[in-house]
Image (cartoon, rainbow, N blue to C red):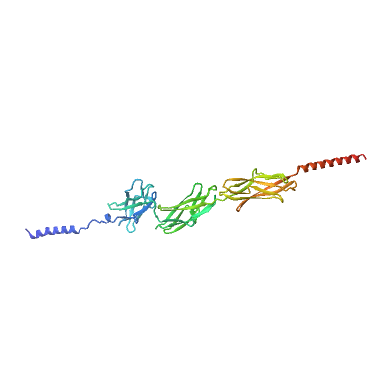
Amino acid sequence: MNRSGAVIPRLVAGAAVTATLVLPVAPASAAGALVLSTPYPSVEAQPGSTVDFDLTVENPQPEAVGLVVSGLEDGWSATIRGGGFVIHEITAEPDAGASATLEVDVPPDAPAGEHHLTIEADGPDGARSAVDLVLVVAEHVDNGITLSADFPSLSGEPGGTFTYQLTVDNETPVEQTFTFDPSGPQGWTVSASPTAEARAQTVTIDAGGTSDINVTATAPATVDEGQYPIDVAVVGANGASGSVTLQAEIVGTPDLGLTTADERLDVSGAANHVQRVPMIVSNTGSAALESVKLAGTAPSDWDVSFEPQELDSILPGETAQVTAVVTPSADAVAGDYAMTVRASAGSLSSNVDLRYTVEGSRTLGVVAVGVIEAAYVALAAVFVRFGRR
């Protein structure tokens, strides 16, 4: 066998082996460099809330990448958004990558505990990257939103307006726009708005920043005394929320009224004769009248008293009857006289001005008529006597 002929095949075989060993593998960048990531893959959420996951998709070369969510439980839903649109693909980019947001709606009846789902990015050349996400459903979640009041409890009268100033503290790492959701008892009017703009319905707060909002609650005029809750919630665009319960204490006020039973303001009677005048004391306020005293002002030597002289209490919306006992003086001549009846309870008072007509004596009337008749007869006699001359 020719030695040179044997060497040539060996060289060819060695070259082939060498070529096999040093032949570069097809670039793995397309299959291995696609990276899908989120900074917070495990979060807490409340039932009925919406959770946002920020997504970043990186690839050595710009190319369209499909995004798919899997593992959602019954009743759960997810939406991928980018640039204000609902998206299904995103153009992955090198360096900083491309951004999108995954919104997950947690159903109101979601049970407490961990719930798992997966978001996957699929490149056109078979590259794949996936992130497993965990939502821990809890009844109460500290989501970084704090709502506090300078004076959470105020007192006032029925029909009054209670004004509270609240501070919203956005302790999250992102700027958020918040809406307000105030509510009160039935019949109350409750509203909330930023302190800087009373007509605004939302407020935008920087990450780590605060903002003040005003809450006004107007009570019905007929509300009873007691304590009433005013609930205020703020909800961020990403579902984060905070709430506070304020308190409005209704402190009732009495309202004293006084009138005659028949609402007439004129009374008549004879001198030195007892006249009984029924009076009505009313309380049209929202708290009880306590220790209502009666008094009267009349001409000199007249006597004015009351039955009873004092009322212990009159409940809201109720009335009580008293009797003013008036006795003109014995020497009061016929005519009209002014007198005042007054009811008082603490700083409250109510007056009624009456016109009292003293009627003339019947005996005096008869005497007067007799005198007039006698004078008439005498005058007639004079005319008869001197008329003949």
Find residue 41 and report its image quarter.
Answer: bottom left
Q: Which quarter of the figure is the C terminus placed in?
A: top right
Residue shown at the point (88%, 40%) measured from the top left: 381
Given residues 177 and 381, the one toward you in this image is: 381
Can residue 18 be seen from the camera position used here? Answer: yes
Q: How many marks?
A: 0
- The answer to whether 325 appears left or right of 85 in the picture is right
Question: Residue 77 or 281: which is nearer the viewer?
Answer: 281
Outermost residue toward the left? Answer: 1
In percent of width and height, residue 278 lies at 65, 44
Q: Is residue 223 left or right of residue 308?
A: left
Residue 18 location in percent, x, y?
A: 17, 59
**Residue sitting nearer the eye, 213 or 198:** 213
Q: Residue at x 9, y 60 (%)?
A: 4
Residue 3 in the image: x percent, y percent? Answer: 8, 60
Q: Is residue 261 above or below residue 8?
A: above
Instruction: State the quadrant of the N terminus.
Output: bottom left
> What residue is shown at x 90% (from left), y 40% (from top)?
385
Frontmost residue, 236 versus 257: 257
Is residue 100 visible in the rendered image? The answer is no
Expressed as whole percent of the image width and height from the top left, the position of residue 197 reads 50, 55
